[in-house]
Every structure is written in C-alpha cells, then in structure tokens.
Image: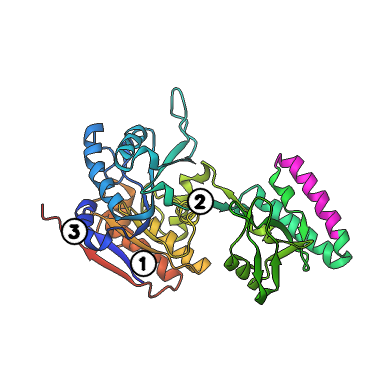
Amino acid sequence: MKNFIYIGDNKVVMESKMNILKNTVDIIYIDPPYNTDQKKSYKDNEYNHSSWKEMMYPRIVLGKKILNEKGVIFISIDDNQAANLKLMCDDIFGIKNFLGVFITMQSQRSNSKHINVVHEYIIAYAKNKSKVPRFESDRIDDLIEGPMIKDITTRVESVFKSLGEEAAKKELSGLIKNYCEKLNITWLKNYNRIDDNGKVFFGKDLSTPGTPRKVAIPEINLYLDPLPTRGWSSDEKFKELAAKNRLYFRGERPYEITYLTEAKDNVSSILDFYSRHGTNDLNKLGLRDLFDTPKPVDLIKYLVNIYPGESHVVCDFFAGSGTTAQAVLELNRDYGTNHRFILVQSEEKLNPSSAPFKKAIELDLEPTVSAIMLHRIKTFLKINDMKNENIEIERIENNE
C-alpha cells in the first residue's frame, strides 16, 4: 500500500496520471485559494471571479473523474467564493448529488464595520449520492454527550460490581432521567439495559421490512416463527451477531446489542473546529510560522472518519502544508486503519516578505509551498518514529 505525493500543477498532474487515478479515490478534501484580500505567503488573491472559476472548474471536473462511484468531495471555502463554488459544483456533479454544507468556526475578528465573520464552509458533493453510505459520528467524541456517556458508563458499572444488577438498573434509570432533562435529549432513553458485565446497551430490533419468513439456524440454536407483517434479518446477520456475543433476548425474540459507548449520531452541519487549531498543529511539530493558514488535522480526520470504512484513499490536490497527509497518518497510527493519501502540490514560491519564507530559509529549505509540505511530513514521521510509510514522491513537469 503506497502513499503518493506529486509535485506539480494539479491540473497537469491529474491529467497525466488519470490512467491510474480514475475511479480510485474515496474522499477528496481540498482547501483551494479563497480569493481573499488578505496578504498571505502564497497566492490567494490573484483571481477575479471569472478567472477563479476558470482556474477551479477544470480541476473539479478532474476531481470528479478520479472519485469512485461511492466517492465524495469536501471543499473548504469562505464567503468570497462560496456562492460561485456551489453553482459550479451543481453544474459538475448535479444538484441531486449535493450532500450539504458544514460550517466551521474561525477566530473572532474585530475589524468589521458591520458583521464579524467567524465562520467558513465545507461544501460536500458525491459522485453518486445514492451509493454514499450514511455519515455518522461517535457520540462519545462529542464535547457534551461524550462526558455524559463516560459518566453513566463508569457509575453504572461501579454500582453493578458493588451492589448488583438491580441497584445498577436503578442507578441507570435515574441517570437517564436526569441527563435527558438536563440536555433536552430523548435518544438516551433507548439505552436502558445492562449486560452480564454491567455495561449499558440498547437492544436493536432485528425485524426488517419485507416478506415474513421463518428462521431456522441449528448451529446457533435459533428458531423463529414468521412475524405477522415484517421479515427477519438475514441468517448471516444472526450468525455474525451470535459469534460476537451480540444477541440479546426478550422472551424468545432476539435483539442486537449496541453499547452506549458505541452510540452514533448523524453528523451535524456545525463543526467545532477553529482555524487556530491548525496553527497549533504546526507548533506541536516545532514548525511555528511554517504556513499561514493550515487547516486543523482533527478537521480532516473527522471528515475521513464520518465515511464508513477503514481503508480509504484520500486525495488532496491543493495540499498546502500537508495537513491531509498528517491526518491520514494519525488515523492509521491511532486506530489501526489502512487509509492512504494522494497529495498534489505545485512548487509555488513563497512571498519573500512572509514569515513562512523566513522560516523556510531558516530551515535551509527551498522557499516553496511544496518544500515546506515535504518538510512537515518528514518531521511528523521522524517525531513519531514512523520510518517507512511507503511514500512515493514524483515531480510532474508542466510542458504546456
């Protein structure tokens, strides 16, 4: 399994590598130029609205081609080009393949005469929306619900071990009532059962829409009569749950055990990620001032995680400082996933008056975006003692 870094113009790279990239990518994340008036170390404000579209349109078309049928694209943008980008993507992907818009938080600004802009967007499209799996996030990672889940789990297990099942059930009932009122939620009421080890769970119904059928699976001693108006889950599903000790019975009817610590929720359009987190990510690597506006590593990890699966191909063809590479490497390191990345970044020169230019010179690097990207990735690998991540680097010349 290889990771690829291509140094060159992203349009030229994708065109020249289309024979191997076409229909192979699961997730594209890009953070293209926003066309702002802010002075940065790289080109961000050189386009008028027409030329920006002329630059972006063919690149997004190529992006669509490298996505597989279940693939999705996430594009960071702000108010300067959000409307143009939405119309452009409607044209390229089709309105029916629009997935939605995430809103991320930015640092508070105080120089506006009217409205302080403290947000940016991530516009999401699918190549074929009907084939994209549901986006979900783990509730235990939520800033509010996570501590609640941990508190309930700890307290119920403690009571179970010291006072027994009935006392634990009473403790759980009280905690559910209090938290539902406090947080104005109802989903927690489903997680009202305790297994033989004191773990809190929800018994998920195993009937399905369809023709009523009889179930007879001798190897797991499961025999079920047909339901009046619904079918049962497949025999394979029942066998899988039995093998994992995930079947729970009320009377003679089976249910699937889903633990409170595994509870999921549909993703929210409001994401709690701030631009300053990206800067902190660089600072932790000892690379302060290496890049003006790096996206947070956790943001890209989040976007990869909400797409079910453990072996995604993640492409970023406006790779910038290499945040996407670090996000993929961290996921593989921390969760044992097998994601891989494809980065594309040109040898764009840094502004000689910028802090990143001075930092590059200090580090004895070429003062280009691609050079600082490679340095960041190498630094991350060294710090984490990740010596061989099968990264192949190729430079693609622009012969136009």
Instruction: Name the image quarter holding the N terminus.
Output: bottom left
Q: Residue at x 50, y 53 (%)?
A: 306
In the image, farthest residue toward the left: 400
Residue 158, position as x, y percentages in the image: 81, 63
Q: Residue at x 48, y 68 (%)?
A: 333
Taking depth in this image into account, of 326 and 337 the one nearest to the observer is: 337
Q: Image check: 114 left or right of 51?
A: right
SS for dot 3: helix
Residue 67, position as x, y percentages in the image: 33, 54
Residue 280, position as x, y percentages in the image: 47, 53
Instruction: Decide: few, some or many residues near mark 2? Use Cα within 10 Å; few <14, some 14-19, many ≥20.
Output: few
Residue 351, position as x, y percentages in the image: 26, 46
Question: Can see residue 313?
Answer: yes
Q: What mark, if any, has residue 16 been given in the picture?
A: 3
- N-term mark: 3 or 1: 3
Between disc 3 and disc 1, the foreground one is 3
Report which residue position mark 1 lands on: 378
SS for dot 2: loop
- N-term mark: 2 or 3: 3
Between disc 2 and disc 3, the foreground one is 2
- N-term mark: 1 or 2: 2
The amino acid on which the numbered mark 1 sits, given as a three-letter code, is Lys
SS for dot 1: helix
Q: Image check: 323 left or right of 374?
A: right
Q: Which residues are magenta?
A: 168-185
Taking depth in this image into account, of 379 and 388 the one nearest to the observer is: 388
Tally of marks: 3
Between disc 1 and disc 2, the foreground one is 2
Mark pair 3, 1: CA separation: 26 Å
Instruction: Decide: few, some or many residues near mark 1? Use Cα within 10 Å; few <14, some 14-19, many ≥20.
Output: some
Instruction: Decide: few, some or many residues near mark 3? Use Cα within 10 Å; few <14, some 14-19, many ≥20.
Output: some
Taking depth in this image into account, of 295 and 216 the one nearest to the observer is: 216
